[in-house]
Amino acid sequence: MSEKDKLVSQSENFNEWYNSLVLRADLADYGPARGTMIVKPYGWALWENLQQALDRRFKATGVQNAGFPMFIPMSFLQKEAKHVEGFAPELAVVTHGGGEALAEPLVVRPTSETIIGHTYANWVQSYRDLPILINLWNSVVRWEKRTKLFLRTLEFYWQEGHTAHATAAEAAERTQMMLDVYADFALNEAAVPVIPGEKSEMERFAGADQTLTIEAMMGDGKALQSGTSHNLGQNFAKAFDITYLDRNNEIQHCWTTSWGLSARFIGAIIMTHGDDHGLVLPPRLAPIQTVIIPIYRKDKDKNMVLEAVERINQELIAAGIRVKVDDRENLTPGYKYNDWELRGVPTRVEVGPRDVAKNSVALARRDISGRDGKQFVSQDGLVQAVQELLVEIQQNLLDKATKFRDENTFDVDNYDDFKTAVKTGFARVWWDGTNAEETQVKEDAKATIRCFPFEQPEGTGTCFFTGRPANKVAIFGRAY
């Protein structure tokens, strides 16, 4: 790779590094309308792997998938006051269709709580109809003014779960359950260490009684909200009259939840694991887990090498490993190494004439560069070696990201140290501020409460900002 083709380093300009990497690694491109995104096949394959990992977890909790319309009557959003107030600045509204003005404007769905509420009100009559556990895989539209590929675009892909329950306890249990699903996915599939906790009232989803979140630290020390689960209480049930006849023949309002994780999690993977050479993808989600590079200079070596490559390819595929053979003849092996390194493929197998003669291959790992990340293994034991290496890489990525997060999370007890801490990472502080004081910190230090972690220290402390006694610790950070 020539100097002009190299990515800018993360330390030099993290924002430029991210933007150019998304494009050059063939994950996505800009759409023709401002703020839109085209997800390319390699990026979509990564999203599909995320979907599958989440979908099987959802279904294991009893959730079923369904599809709902993308157009929502404007009157629906106006039924829940906090909800419409929270989303009003981001709405895309259709006023004409078929060349005629519509009797009622339609909103292009920013999220589906309202149309779900309307529908559940028709579906639920008795306690026997509950619970309803539904998930949607769709896209939504929010008219963002500042956009960034995967992290914030006008239209984005996600899943949104919507459940209805007979009791407050069941809704609370489901809210926590789905956040636990997200945390398990982040740790065990994406190797992204997250902090699970509760949002402050200021950061709560519009119309919810409680919002739970998983927060991750990116490679520049900023936070990324990576998945949320909302306990909606009876707010939407009362707005849309979702009622049921209980066992005592009394009419009750349901308790509802919603929860979502979007393709912005691809951004989390990029910014958590990526380095100056490109993507570093966790093996469990990588579209390609192993790339095989045939190496030969002379025609007489070609057939011998390609025969060995094809045999190795079939053995790896039979073992369930996602494999790509790069047999492009117009490119040098060195170019191919750099190309697949840019794309973050976890392992690389190099096969040349000498390797065939020795019944060996060179096996390189993406998470450790250079000679330290390369070993020579027997072709006979290659499948097992690759399988073990993929497991090792997955764990190494999690360990490395956890170490980085912990080293950049600072316990501070005064405002000056706080402002220094949030420039490069998270500030962990005792907090007893009001909404107004939280807003003051946000405006002054450009940092927000990411969450009140579920793991809290014992006892009490002193609020770093107000000096008042405090009984809970908050994580503050600057966020995407």
Image (cartoon, helix red, strand yellow):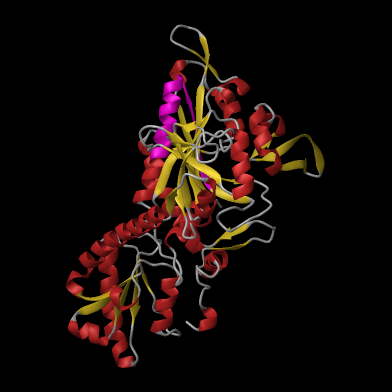
Q: Residue at x 47, y 32 (%)?
A: 470
Q: Residue at x 23, y 62 (%)?
A: 388
Residue 337 screen position, x and y as percent: 39, 77
Q: Nearer the viewer, residue 63 or 197?
A: 197
Q: Which residues are magenta?
A: 158-180
Residue 168 seen from this side: yes
Q: Nearer the viewer, residue 268 or 295?
A: 268
Q: Residue at x 37, y 41 (%)?
A: 57
Residue 266 screen position, x and y as percent: 48, 56
Q: Say whether residue 160 is magenta.
A: yes
**468 is higher (above) or lower (below) than 346:** above
Q: Nearer the viewer, residue 463 or 193?
A: 463
Residue 263 seen from this side: no
Residue 166 screen position, x and y as percent: 46, 19
Q: Nearer the viewer, residue 458 or 158?
A: 458
**129 is higher (above) or lower (below) than 458:** above
Q: How many marks?
A: 0
Residue 319 screen position, x and y as percent: 25, 61
Q: Say whether residue 404 is magenta.
A: no
